Image (tube, coloured by chain):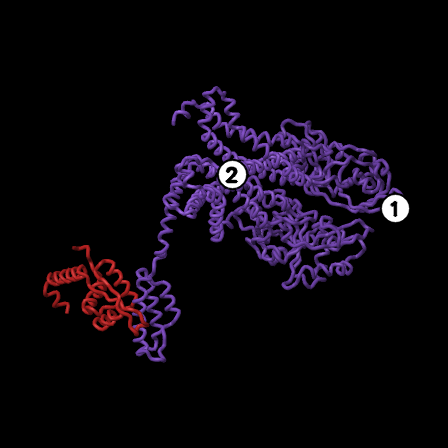
């Protein structure tokens, strides 16, 4: 299924959404990614990817309840769809397949 | 977290975000932004700035709302639909569409071409950066002794051509004046460089301040010093190339008039939209060195004076002090006055006489603009007529659309979009026509018409606006009329074109043909007036008269008698005369005094002056009405005789020419008796009456032209032989010839060009009107197809049917005639009033133009009517 290729950032975002399960909304995803991966993520970059993934059908979203914080704005929670799960799985297998094909000495020398 | 002293995110960034963000995403993203901001305010001082940065990073395609808002999507589709239907309709009704497009494109192209021409006329002298602050002096030289009220003196009594000392005197007297510049009237000079020798016309003496006032394009040389030293000359690029080719002309010497070497100190190009032009400029100091006394003489007239004002001063301030100025500077009570005229009036609005170059006419600008509007109007009317004519066919479409649920506005848009589409196609075609027509217009108008000013963003917008405007104007009637149809009436089949529609269509046709007849009659009047001028008996005969110019050449002047005799020996030469100028040339005026008929005192007037020899009057076949011509039998004629024309005799108070013979005169240092009176002849243009003229004997130094009357069949051969004789006597001087009648007619050139432009565009107008008529004929014959069939079956002849089909039009035509003739008569009469010698407007002009219009109209219609009349009735009756 070669046509479903995930970009690196897309993959990371989807994995983070998976990690956060029910608490995956915009800002939480950013926090999580910054914490785990030690990289800066802008809202713009993240939101664009989230919407794109949603359009592709890998993510679904629903609005939460309004709270007093964040200016009274509701959160949008993202979930992996089954298509999303499949594509993540596929990506993982592709990577593993590649890793397994690398001769052992090359990996050793590279470290 | 809700602390009372909480800072809020930057307002403008938030507003910006809310404006651009896709509405579906706005809420949760805004929440994220807030959350991040709140968190940052605790740990980071730059939170506000980071917030803005975040907002800016959100400004990307995935987040921004679509340009066509979701709520407008429906309209957008409708427009797409209008466009598609419009194109289909254009393609389906090929004849009507092409008639429409052809008419409109010709109309638009004519409009643009006329706009290019008019814009060029209006742009004269605007290239000067001092355009607003530059003025020129206009002078009044009145009869001595009289003292008119100068404030009420009309401007046309003044002349631009004036004296030399006024310029430095003004510079000294008026603190408001910044720079003053003078130049002289043009003259011909002989230019020689190496072996190349030509006589060059339009060479002026000019002050060194020329470039302070006029922004001519300086190609080489220092504008500050180019005209300072004596014996320096500034050339136009054309002359520079003619004499020096690819060499650098700067610093080279040109031998002028076979005498002094002049140094070339500059090359300048005069823009084509300058109210005076030249081929070369010679420094004023050269002139001053040769004739210094002129520069102090207030009576010697040969200079045009221009000046600029200092910033913050006004011409009124200067004008106010003129009486003071004249009192302080003017040596005597010679009846003299000055006024000022802004440079912006020099080309189009100057009434003063003796202009330094050709002037334009506001009148023709108005006329051309109206012609342009007429053509466009006729084209728009075509469009309206054809659209309404088609309405029966379109009515069904409208009714079905309405039944399905179309709003009236939607239908209006539909028709407007169609009209705009047609206009758009027509304007593209018009652009092509303009490209071809432009060079043609340049040829007809004899001017360089720049078009680079057209290609600016503003004009592109203007063009779009124009297309919209014309489209809406032409499409408005069909749009509003057709969209009112009641679907029930139409679909039941009882619908016929409303009588109101027919009435409107008829009045529009009347309007079209009124305009056409006005234009055609105008063209006819203009051309017959020009014809009249060409054939008018001027009072002298210049046919086959060859003029040889030698520009006051000293050697030629010395040998003039010998040249005359040698020329006369040639078998093709009838008579030879030497004079200062020939009719149609430039001539000066002179203060001339003649004894008053009653008191016998010398009274001074300022008639024009010709300097001639004894053969001049017979050579040009002028008639003496009293006294005698100059003659060899009276050797003192060159010192004490004067001939006047009838007008001059009247001017001096002698209505009967014979009475003035033998009276004393004084003129330019000569005194003696008036010996003859010549019959009035038109030595200027027929725009004016014959002005007073005096003819004096031209002594050696005052002649510059030889007139040779030829009686040859082969002019080029005769001229070549005469040139041989000339070269044998004065080889240094080129044999510079022209025919006097051609030269004289050259002054009607601007009239002729006006006539040609006018005729061309009138023709186009009629063409466009005929396109419309053709379309209507197609329509009406197709409407009456069945009627024609029945009539033919009943035994109607072809002629009867053609007459039937044309009869309606004839009525309209007669009404159009009744409207247009009085209008045109009024307009053309006022145009003719600009000529002192004019045709009287007769019935013939209108009869001819009405006949032509009628003929063209019938021929146009006959393409269709004859066809319809000849067709087999079975064809039209069969399809039940």
**Which sits in the foreground, B701 or B270?**
B270
Residues beneath discs 1 and 2 located on the same chain: yes
In the picture, one chain is purple; tell me its letter: B
**Which sits in the foreground, B812 or B301?**
B812
**Which sits in the foreground, B30 or B221?**
B30
Task: Identify the residue at image location x=49%, y=34%.
Answer: B776
Q: Secondary structure at mark 1?
A: loop
Q: Quadrant of the C terminus of chain B?
A: top left
Query: x, y percentage for residue B483?
Result: 44, 43
Query: x, y percentage for residue B669?
Result: 81, 47
Circle 1 chain: B
The vertical placement of B134 against B643, above or below, is below
Front disc: 1 or 2: 2
Asked if residue B468 lies left or right of residue B285, the reply is left
Give the quarter of the image for residue B329.
bottom right
Q: Secondary structure at mark 2?
A: helix
Give the quarter of the image for residue B819.
top right
Disc 1 versus disc 2: distance between alpha carbons? 80 Å
Q: Colour of chain A?
A: red
> Which badge, 1 or 2, is on the more N-terminal residue?
2
Q: Which mark is residue B500?
A: 2
Q: Quadrant of the N terminus of chain B?
A: bottom left
Q: Which mark is residue B438?
A: none
Residue B725 seen: no
The vertical placement of B115 against A22, above or below, is above
How many numbered badges does the structure rendering display? 2
Circle 2 chain: B
Residue B333 seen: yes
Q: Which residue is mark 1?
A: B601
């Amino acid at each position: 299924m070669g046509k479903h290729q995930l970009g690196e950032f897309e993959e990371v975002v989807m994995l983070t959404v998976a990690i956060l399960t029910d608490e995956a909304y915009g800002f939480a995803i950013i926090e999580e990614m910054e914490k785990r991966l030690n990289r800066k993520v802008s809202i713009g970059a993240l939101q664009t990817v989230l919407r794109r993934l949603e359009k592709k059908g890998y993510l679904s979203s629903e609005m939460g309840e309004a709270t007093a914080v964040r200016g009274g704005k509701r959160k949008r929670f993202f979930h992996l769809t089954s298509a999303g799960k499949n594509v993540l799985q596929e990506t993982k297998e592709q990577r593993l397949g590649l890793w397994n094909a690398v001769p052992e000495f090359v990996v050793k020398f590279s470290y | 977290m809700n602390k009372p002293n909480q800072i809020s995110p930057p307002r403008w960034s938030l507003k910006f975000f809310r404006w651009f963000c896709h509405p579906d995403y706005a809420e949760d993203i805004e929440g994220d932004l807030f959350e991040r901001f709140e968190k940052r305010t605790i740990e980071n001082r730059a939170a506000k700035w980071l917030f803005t940065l975040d907002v800016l990073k959100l400004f990307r395609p995935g987040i921004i709302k679509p340009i066509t808002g979701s709520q407008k999507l429906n309209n957008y589709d409708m427009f797409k639909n209008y466009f598609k239907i419009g194109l289909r309709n254009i393609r389906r009704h090929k004849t009507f569409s092409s008639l429409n497009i052809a008419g409109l494109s010709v109309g638009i192209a004519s409009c643009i071409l006329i706009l290019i021409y008019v814009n060029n006329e209006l742009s004269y002298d605007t290239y000067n950066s001092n355009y607003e602050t530059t003025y020129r002096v206009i002078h009044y030289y009145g009869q001595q002794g009289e003292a008119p009220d100068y404030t009420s003196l009309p401007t046309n009594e003044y002349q631009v051509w004036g004296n030399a000392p006024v310029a430095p005197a003004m510079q000294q007297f008026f603190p408001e004046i910044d720079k003053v510049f003078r130049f002289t009237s043009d003259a011909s000079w002989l230019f020689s460089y190496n072996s190349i020798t030509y006589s060059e016309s339009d060479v002026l003496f000019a002050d060194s301040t020329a470039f302070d006032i006029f922004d001519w394009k300086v190609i080489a040389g220092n504008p500050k010093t180019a005209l300072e030293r004596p014996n320096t000359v500034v050339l136009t690029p054309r002359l520079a190339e003619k004499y020096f080719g690819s060499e650098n002309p700067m610093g080279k010497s040109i031998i002028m008039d076979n005498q002094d070497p002049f140094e070339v100190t500059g090359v300048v190009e005069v823009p084509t939209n300058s109210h005076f032009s030249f081929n070369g400029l010679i420094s004023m100091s050269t002139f001053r060195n040769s004739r210094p006394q002129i520069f102090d003489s207030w009576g010697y007239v040969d200079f045009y004076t221009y000046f600029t004002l200092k910033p913050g001063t006004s011409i009124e301030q200067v004008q106010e002090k003129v009486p003071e100025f004249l009192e302080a500077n003017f040596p005597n009570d010679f009846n003299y006055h000055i006024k000022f005229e802004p440079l912006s009036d020099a080309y189009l609005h100057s009434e003063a006489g003796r202009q330094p170059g050709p002037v334009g006419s506001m009148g023709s600008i108005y006329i051309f603009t109206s012609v342009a509007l007429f053509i466009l109007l006729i084209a728009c009317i075509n469009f309206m007529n054809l659209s309404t004519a088609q309405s029966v066919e379109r009515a069904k479409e409208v009714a079905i659309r309405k039944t399905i649920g179309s709003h009236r506005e939607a239908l209006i848009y539909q028709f407007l979009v169609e009209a705009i589409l047609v206009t758009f196609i027509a304007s593209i075609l018009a652009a092509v026509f303009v490209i071809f027509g432009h060079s043609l217009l340049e040829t007809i108008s004899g001017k360089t018409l720049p078009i680079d000013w057209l290609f600016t963003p503003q004009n592109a917008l203007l063009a779009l606006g124009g297309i919209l405007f014309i489209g809406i104007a032409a499409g408005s009637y069909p749009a509003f009329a057709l969209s009112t149809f009641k679907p029930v009436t139409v679909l039941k089949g009882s619908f016929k074109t409303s009588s109101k529609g027919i009435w409107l269509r008829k009045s529009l046709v009347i309007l079209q043909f009124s305009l056409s007849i006005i234009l055609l009659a105008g063209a006819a009047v203009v051309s017959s007036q020009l014809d009249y001028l060409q054939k008018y008996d001027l009072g002298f005969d210049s046919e086959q008269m060859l003029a040889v110019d030698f520009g006051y050449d000293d050697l030629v002047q010395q040998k003039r008698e010998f040249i005359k005799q040698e020329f006369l020996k040639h078998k093709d030469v009838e008579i030879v005369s030497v004079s200062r100028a020939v009719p149609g040339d430039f001539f000066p005026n002179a203060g001339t005094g003649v004894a008053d008929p009653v008191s016998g005192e010398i009274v001074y007037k300022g008639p024009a002056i010709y300097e001639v020899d004894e053969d001049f009057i017979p050579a040009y076949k002028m008639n003496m009405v009293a006294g005698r011509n100059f003659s060899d039998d009276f050797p003192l004629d060159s010192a004490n005789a004067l001939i006047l024309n009838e007008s001059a005799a009247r001017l001096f108070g002698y209505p009967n020419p014979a009475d003035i013979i033998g009276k004393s005169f004084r003129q330019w240092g000569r005194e003696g008796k008036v010996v003859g009176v010549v019959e009035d002849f038109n030595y200027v243009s027929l725009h004016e009456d014959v002005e007073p003229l005096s003819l004096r004997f031209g002594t050696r130094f005052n002649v510059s032209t030889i007139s040779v009357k030829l009686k040859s069949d082969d002019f080029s051969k005769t001229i070549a032989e005469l040139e041989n004789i000339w070269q044998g006597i004065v080889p240094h001087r080129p044999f510079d010839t022209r025919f006097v009648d051609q030269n004289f007619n050259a002054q009607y050139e601007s009239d002729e060009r006006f006539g040609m432009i006018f005729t061309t565009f009138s023709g186009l107008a009629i063409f466009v009107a005929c396109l419309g008529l053709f379309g209507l004929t197609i329509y009406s014959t197709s409407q009456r197809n069945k009627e024609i069939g029945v009539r033919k079956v009943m035994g109607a002849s072809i002629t009867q049917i053609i007459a039937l089909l044309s009869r309606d039009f004839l009525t309209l035509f007669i009404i159009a005639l009744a409207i247009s003739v009085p209008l045109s008569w009024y307009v053309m009469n006022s145009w003719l009033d600009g000529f002192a010698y004019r045709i009287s407007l007769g019935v013939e002009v209108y009869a001819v133009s009405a006949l032509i219009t009628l003929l063209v109209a019938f021929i146009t219609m006959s393409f269709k009517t004859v066809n319809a009349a000849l067709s087999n009735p079975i064809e039209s009756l069969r399809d039940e």
